Amino acid sequence: MKIGYLGAGSWGFCLASLLASKGYDVMVWTVKPDLAKQLNETREHPFLPGHQSKGKMHFTADLKEVLKHAEFLVESVTSAGIRPVFEQIKQIAIPKCPIVLTSKGIEQNTGLILPEVVIEVLGENIRSQVGFVSGPSYAAEVIRGLPTSVVASAYDPDVMKHVCEVFSTNTFRVYPNQDILGVAYGGALKNVIAIACGISEGLGLGFSAKAALMTRGLHEIRKLAVARGCKAETLNGLAGMGDLCVTCSSVMSRNYRFGYLLAQGLSTKEAQEKIQMVVEGAYTCKSALQISHQYHVQMPITEIIHKIIYEEMPPVDAVDYLMQRTVKEEHL
């Protein structure tokens, strides 16, 4: 099978390499011609040194070439980049094959999860083709073949089954989950909580504070997701708690590192520049707050992270704000 892959960041390179290692013919698109040239020559991604691409992989900056090639299309761009990329695709040709998204986020202003953005751009007729992969996973570990478990979802059960089959390996386990909205919400919102945990670490607040942030953060995620019609149990699984645990406790998480840098006194711009990659939690934070106001759901951690990132609240003041909130009975 010929697979078209959109995005050549570290995660895109990693998953494309995984697919190629299974014998698929993978063509990877990047908006950067120089990166495509470098990857074709070295077979090694600059963010994943020491790990060369496996199997049959080709890198290109020609989107038409990738679409013409694809019998199965996978996306790993950014949440903010989903709409413009698929608007380009619409101008070329609407895909007739499965479209699998792996980016994690919620679009600002519209409140749409990323699969819904693609459907809005390409048309309702492609809904049955759209799938989604999410869960606790780091490119640096997956590309080394370390055991990883994620979730695949889709609007059509047959597509969901197909996605599981295409991505599954001896070390990359893919569980089906029909709640695509819940899977998307878990993957997107945990990035906001990871920023909070990074700030906690940067301020030296200890393990107890981080445990509280993760627990109450999961409560925030579940409240908003359920208000949107997601299944609560989805947020207790790999796409929710699982992804939250790994993202909130590892320096490999760019969201966690971003929060840590903010706590060290860097501005939002300085921290993003130092990370050198997109910090999805900073983008999703705005979306989450917009939706929480619409559905009248209180999300104090998300609110305070928004104040730190966009209103320049000192992180140490945020601690006082959270700790002085009125205490209520804990409901899970």
Image (spheres, rainbow, N blue to C red):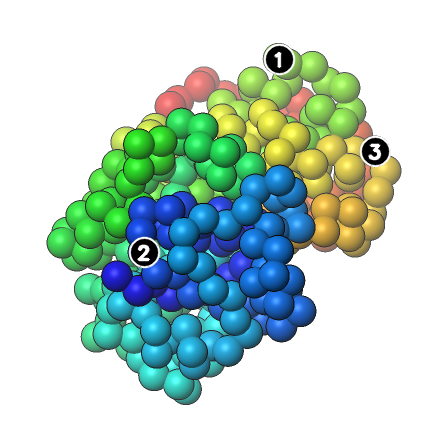
Q: Is residue 151 left or right of residue 200?
A: left
Residue underneath mark 1: 208
Q: Secondary structure at mark 3?
A: loop
Q: Residue at x 76, y 27 (%)?
A: 202
**CB atoms at circles 3 and 1 under 8 Å apart?**
no
Q: Earlier in the sequence, mark 1 or mark 2?
A: 2
The three-letter code of the residue at mark 2 reads Tyr
Which secondary structure lies at badge 1? helix
Mark nearer the viewer, 1 or 2: 2
Nearest to viewer (mark 2 / mark 3)? 2
Q: Residue at x 52, y 71 (%)?
A: 60
* Foreground tag (3 vs 1): 3
Q: Quadrant of the N terminus?
A: bottom left
Labels 3 and 1: the sequence-earlier one = 1
The picture places residue 187, in percent across and down from the top left corner, at 44, 43
Q: Nearer the viewer, residue 67 or 302?
A: 67
Instruction: Look at the image and tell me in which quarter the C terminus lies.
Output: top left
> Mark 2 Cα within 10 Å, few/some/many (few <14, many 20+)?
some
Label 1: few (<14), some or many (≥20) within 10 Å?
Answer: few
Q: CA distance from mark 3 to mark 1?
A: 20 Å
Residue 250 visible somewhere in the drawing: yes
- Do residues under tags 2 and 3 come within 8 Å of each other at their CB atoms? no
Instruction: Work out how far the residue at label 2 is from the one at label 3, CA to CA, in angstroms.
Output: 45 Å
Rendering quarter of residue 36:
bottom right
Query: Disc 3 residue type?
Result: Gln
SS state under label 2: loop
Q: Which residue is mark 2?
A: 24
Would you name the residue on which mark 3 appears?
264
